Image (cartoon, helix red, strand yellow):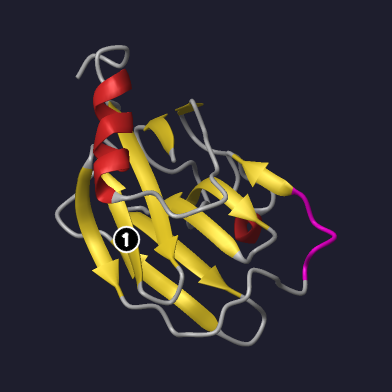
């Protein structure tokens, strides 16, 4: 989860990376302003979802969260509201073949020369799936700080 503020992607970028965990876990803003959440390894993509009807490229603060709840569900929340959800492909065990690479905040590993075009505040990674109530509580706890 993170609070982001961006006016869009920089020149030549294909994704505005918020989090990148060795290609295996990715949360990013797209050229259209939607949020993409991907989980995979070199052979299988277990989660690949994006929001619709959302534009975070408006130079305003947004709270974005990607949650994978085991093999039961994967959900993207924007400003405390579920904006996309799928049932993941079963079987991801939390590992991937790029374990030697670093966790990146503010960068998509597929756009290696590019960094997040905007600001990222209060990034958090959890060792469990957040519930919808917890996502809403986290949004409400800080929305005043970000002018919402």
Residue under label 1 = 75
Where does the N terminus fall, quadrant-wise? top left
Report the magenta residues as a range: 98-102
Q: Residue at x 27, y 26 (%)?
A: 60
Q: Position of residue 130 (x, y in %)?
A: 39, 49
Q: In the figure, 125 relative to 60: above or below?
A: below
Q: Position of residue 108 (x, y in %)?
A: 59, 52
Q: In the figure, 5 relative to 29: above or below?
A: above
Q: In the figure, 97 relative to 69: above or below?
A: below
Q: Residue at x 61, y 52 (%)?
A: 20
Q: Position of residue 147 (x, y in %)?
A: 23, 14
Q: Is residue 112 shown left or right of residue 16?
A: right
| Magenta highlight on residue 109 | no
Q: Is residue 20 shown left or right of residue 32?
A: right
Q: Which image quarter: residue 7?
A: top left
Q: Position of residue 56 (x, y in %)?
A: 28, 40
Where does the C terminus fall, quadrant-wise? top left
Q: Residue at x 23, y 39 (%)?
A: 80
């Amino acid at each position: 989860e993170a609070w982001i503020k961006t006016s869009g992607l920089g020149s030549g970028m294909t994704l505005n990376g918020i989090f990148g965990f060795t290609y295996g876990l990715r949360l990013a803003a797209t050229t259209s302003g939607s949020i993409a959440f991907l989980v995979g390894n070199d052979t299988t993509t277990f989660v690949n979802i994006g929001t619709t009807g959302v534009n975070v490229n408006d130079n305003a603060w947004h709270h974005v969260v990607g949650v994978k709840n085991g093999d039961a569900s994967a959900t993207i929340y924007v400003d405390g509201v579920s904006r996309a959800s799928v049932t993941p492909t079963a079987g991801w065990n939390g590992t991937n073949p790029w374990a030697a690479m670093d966790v990146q905040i503010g960068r998509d590993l597929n756009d290696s020369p590019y960094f997040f075009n905007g600001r990222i505040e209060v990034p958090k990674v959890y060792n469990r799936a957040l519930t919808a109530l917890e996502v809403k509580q986290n949004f409400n706890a800080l929305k005043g700080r970000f002018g919402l």
